Image (cartoon, rainbow, N blue to C red):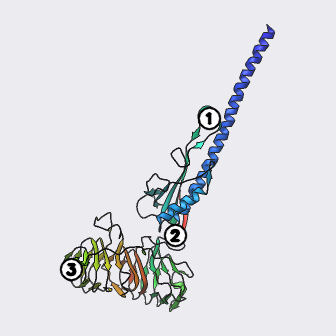
Amino acid sequence: MKIGKRKNERGVALIWTALIMLVLVSFIGLAVDFGLMVWTGQQLQITADGAALAGAQWVRTDEVLVRDQAQLVAVSNVAGGVNIQLDRNDGNAAGGDIVVGRYDRDTRTFDPTGFPNAVYVNARRTAASQNGALPLHFARIMGFNQTDMQRDAIAMIGGGTGTGMLILDSDAECALTIRGNPTIELNDGAIQVNSTDPCGTCLQGDPLIESTGFNMVGDACLTGVTEDEVPPLNANQDPILDPLADLPEPFWDPSQDKGAINADGTYTGGYYSGGISLSGQDVVLEPGIYILGGDGIDIAGSTTFLAEGVMLYILEGPVDIRGTGDLTITPPDPDLYGYPDVGTYENVAMFQARTNTAEGRVLGTADMLFEGTYYFPQNKINLGGTANNFGDQFIAWQAEIFGNGTITLAVDGSIPAPGNRVFLVE
C-alpha cells in the first residue's frame, strides 16, 4: 500500500510539474509577445513623429509634397519587421494615415479644414492597413494570432505666419524701396526680396517696419536709417518662388464686351474693354470675375466703391487708385459664392496680367478696406497713403513704399517665410 501511494504521489507531482511548466512557458511567451508589442509601438511612434515632421515642412506650399515626404520617411522606418507604408489619403479624410489641417495650440485641437499649418500622421500595423496586423508568437497557444497597433503624431509649422510682402525681381537694384516715414505692419508676417543685387533693398528716411523677418537673397543699402531701427536684415537667403506662377488667366469672350465701369450703378462680372474709370461715382461690383482692359483701374476723387467677392484681372492699363472715398475689395471665397472659377481664384482679389507691365500706384486712405492677395507678377507698384487694411498678401515684381502713412497687411500665411520651424505638438 505504501508503494502504491508513492507511485500516485509521483504521478500527481508530474502532472503538477507539467501544468506549472505550461503556465511558466505561457507567461514567458506572453512576456515575449508583450515586449514585441511595446517595441513595435515605439517603432510606430518614431515613424509617425518623423513622417509628420517631414510633411509639415511643406504644409503651407505643396500638399502633394506633404504626402510624398511623409510616405518617404515612413517607408524608411521598420516596425514589427516591416517597412511602414502610409496611405496618401489624397481626399484628406479625417481618419486617414496622412491628414493635412489646422492645429489650434490654444484649444489643442486639429481640424482637417481651414488654412493648413499642421500634419497628422497615423502609423498602423492593423489588419486594415497596408502593413497588416502585428503577428504574435507564443500567444497563439491561447488563440491570439495577431494584434492591431497604431501610433499617431501631429507636427505643425511655426515661426511667423508667412511672407506678407514678396518682391519677385531676381536681380534689380532697389527692387524694393522704402523711403520717407511710412509705417509698415505685417502682423506675424515677413518681407522677402528675391533680388540678388547688393542693394536689392533700399531703405531711406525713418520707416517703421513691424514684421517677423526681413529676408533678402542679396543685401540692403541704407540711407538715413540704421540697422538697429529696422527688423533684422537677413541677407543671402534662399529665394521664394512665385507661389502663383501657375495661376491661370481667366477666360473671357471678347464678343461679350460690357464696355466700361465709369458711372453710378451695380455691375456684374465679365469683360470690360474700357476698364474701370471713376471719379466721384457710387459703384457696386457684384461677386464674380472682372476682366479689365483700356485704362485698367483708375479710381480717383470721392468715389464709393464696393466690390465684395471679386477678382479683378487687369488685362491692360495700370492700377491707379488714389480716391478719397470708401473703397472695399474682398476676394473670391467658395464658402460664400458659387460662380464659375470662384475656387480657382480663391483669396486673389487683384491679378495684373503677366503681359501687362504698366507701373501702378495705390494711395490708400483710412476708409480703404482691401482683403485677399494682390498679385502684380510683372509690375512695379507704388504704395503710399494711409491704407490701414491693404490685403492679406502683396506679391509684386518691384515695389516702392513711401510717405508718412500706415500700410497694413493681415498676412494669411499662404507664402512660407524663411526660418519657419516645424515641431511636434502631439
Q: Secondary structure at mark 3?
A: strand
Q: Sequence order check: which comes first, mark 3 or mark 2?
A: 2
- Tell me the CA gap for discs 2 and 1: 50 Å
Q: Amino acid at mark 2?
A: Gly
Q: Report the residue marked by disc 3.
A: 282
Give the labeled residue for mark 2: 159
Residue 425 at least partly seen = yes
x and y, in percent, of residue 6 in the image: 79, 14
- Asked whether, in this view, residue 258 is left or right of residue 100, the answer is left
Residue 223: give x, y in percent of width and height.
51, 92
Residue 66 point in image, percent of width and height: 50, 63
At label 3, the amino acid type is Asp
Q: Is residue 254 above or below residue 63?
A: below
Q: Quadrant of the N terminus?
A: top right
Residue found farthest to the right: 3
Q: Residues within 10 Å of mark 3 (few under 14, many from 20)?
A: some
Report the mark closest to the observer, 2 or 1.
1
User: What residue is shown at x 70% (from left), y 32% (from top)?
Assistant: 24
